[in-house]
Amino acid sequence: MRLFKHPLFLSILILVGLYVLFAHILNPPLPKSLLIQYMTICAVAILLVVTFDDKSAARFFAPIVALLGAPRLKFWRFLSFVGVVVGTGYLTYGFVKPVITSPLELRTVHPAPPSTLRVYGNSYNLLTLQNPYRELGDTSDEYAEIVAQGAELYYKNCIFCHGDMLDGTGHFADTFTPRPINFQDVGMIAQLQESFLFWRITTGGPGLPREGTPWASAMPVWSEILTEDEVWKIISFLYDYTGYEPRSWELEETTGEAPVADEQTAAIDALDADAVDAIYMKRCAQCHGEDGDGLGVAAEFMYPAPRDFTLGLFKYKTTDADSEFPSDADLHATIKNGLTGTAMPAWGDILSDAEIDALIEKIKEFGYWDGESPEDLGLNPIELGRPPAVTPELLARGREQFVKACVQCHGEEGRGNITSGKRLADDSETRIWPRNLTQPETWRVTMDAEDVFQRLSTGIPGTPMPEHATTMAIEDRWAIANYVMTLRENSVPLSEGESVIKAVRINGDLPMGYDDPLWDQAPAMTFNMAPNVIKEPRLFTSLNDMVTVRALYNGDDIVIRVDVDDRTYSVPGAELERQYALDDVTATRDAIAVQIPAALSGTNEKPYFRLGDSRNPVNLWYWAAPSVEPELAETAVIYDATGADNPMVARADSADLSAHGEWNNGRWSVVYRRALVTNAPEDLAFQEGVYTPIAFANWDGLAGEEGLRQSFTAWYWLLLEPDENPTRDWGFAIGAALLAGLLFIVLAMLARERVKQQKNV
């Protein structure tokens, strides 16, 4: 017990706890440099407290003096000496050795608004600006109609990023940095005036002041798309849906408190029909329609389309192929957990289990199968049998069966590139595409081999995915299921929190082909892409949603390989292009681009992430696939861009850039090559050890995408890794270790003399 009360032990315990907090609990984690500063400040503060007088200082240092000078502690002194020397060397080596982390980007989440705003041809005083619809009264029928109109506008324009639940988890939210705002957060709109939202909505990301950099916000300039009246209607809807009151300048009227409960759910004890209808209308109708027919106001902008409940067909179920309907547990899981890769959110964070169950009954009413018991419906679970052990022989058998039954739709490598020539459509005759089995991030409810087995057994109702229980032995279904799980190894997983593409230096020639073994030396990074939902002409859906990047360089050039999984080969006039072609769509050439700044700012300020801005231009390394009709070779052009409002300017001479792409089994791989330093003043000079912003874009020719109708990423970082210098790194580490050892010896000698003096006294 004396040990636990000693100030030295308590100080060490506090420092360890603070380190765990700073290094492992805080999110986002502190950069290494900031962590060292914080720990140094904390250590100094603790020393000041425990040594505030001679008596406390003597008690604090007594165990240290004894360890360094007492003859009976010789063994522990030796261990401490070794620990100090080795520990100092280890920490020094870790400090001086180059560490690849993204640069620190601090930004103000809620920057101070200007006092005046010029938009819609008018000048607004933001200190006095008020929502004109507040005069109607929050409880009036007129205001309710304004909120309803605002809801329709929100679900047609804002749902893609801010989400169905207004919590910043929209379908494309993961693409953007910073993430879209969570309106449900009590620290968000509850703390803001409506005039602040009017400013941020109308001016978007480009309207951020300098403290709001690094200019990565994907918020559109909505004054280019929406009218002033429409913006106020959306603001009214945001406050009504979340239940917050807007902050005002009159402090006595400001609460900023979270609602005790949602208006719809506060009075729901018995969950009567009116209450359930209210939940459905608020949470579900915008996508699935007021009548459950899948024709909500947001439906036309979504792929896949929202479920039509009136058909009684549900894709994901654990009941067998002979069972027409899913179980209640299947529906409950879908509503509660959502569907990954779609706009269907996980409602479990907002709705209780009782509310979800009540919604299931309403869904059944739409399909006219309410009131039926599982026995009456004939619901039988899928027969699983005994899952086999995963062996090389099982996987070989799975591959053999996969080729027989699955390749025609999912492709040789499982990327969803149809090889049979069929044009797949769902029961509503909407063109659909097979799942890319190499991207588990896009799988809906299928997580493991058992889930794959269930999909194989019962199929996916309403789609061309058939049931295989009657045509394939259970052993073969398990073999395919386990083989399908291995297809994930054919892709690079999404980068979680990592944003630095490391370009590795090699000696000798750089690769030009995508299949060169040298690419194995380059770490691969995969990032999300989102269609251009932020500026007209907008694009709301895209089949190509990820990009994988690798980079290598030598003393002269840099090569960047960009891979995009593209189910469809869009080379106009080619046989495959005609096979995939969409009705009423004129195909364009598939294209991929790399975007970099024309110059580095020297600060954390970057160009606007889509095509730069007038003060910060960007270069676009644009590659386009060849064409058969008209006959065109693949193209590599450098474009100079100064913002999406200005036309990109093609270089008269793009000879500094070369690029070659190949499409293979549902994937484009394009290799770009450029000199590290060119003679063009508009080109960025690549330097070792310098972080360079980089972004990517893709045009899917199948959908006729061109110009601003494209998919793109946010800014990431490209770093040309400098050559390691072991002599320098180990030299610093050994020198620091020797210095620490020498200091330990000196302190031990002084402590020993002090112990002798104390004995003599």
Image (spheres, rainbow, N blue to C red):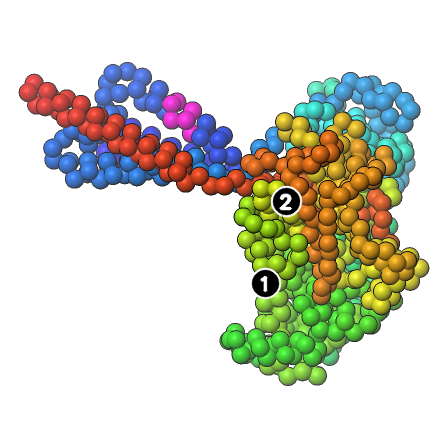
Tell me the crowding category of disc 1: few under 14, some 14 to 19, or many 20 or more residues within 10 angstroms, Cα based. Answer: few
Examine the structure image and report whether residue 40 is included in the region drawn in magenta: yes
> Dot 1 corresponds to which residue?
489
Which amino acid does the dot numbered 1 rest on?
A: Glu
User: Can the viewer see residue 310 in this picture?
Assistant: no
Q: Residue furthest left?
A: 760
Mark 2, secondary structure of its residue = strand
Specify the label residue 558 is tagged with: 2
Which amino acid does the dot numbered 2 rest on?
A: Ile
- Residue drawn at the location 36% of the way across and 35% of the way down: 731
Quadrant of image for the N terminus: top left
Work out whether residue 710 or residue 388 is closer to the camera in this orientation and state it. Answer: 710
- Residue drawn at the location 58% of the way across and 77% of the way down: 396
User: Can the viewer see residue 397 in this picture?
Assistant: yes
37 above or below 673? above
Task: Please provide the residue range marked out in magenta.
Answer: 39-45
Work out whether residue 673 or residue 474 is closer to the camera in this orientation and state it. Answer: 673
Q: Position of residue 397 (x, y in %)?
A: 59, 79
Q: Position of residue 591 (x, y in %)?
A: 79, 52
Work out whether residue 389 or residue 597 is closer to the camera in this orientation and state it. Answer: 597
Say whether residue 746 is left or right of residue 330. Answer: left
The answer for how far apart the CA atoms under marks 1 and 2 are is 27 Å
Residue 719 image-quadrant placement: top right
104 above or below 301? above
Q: Residue furthest top?
A: 53
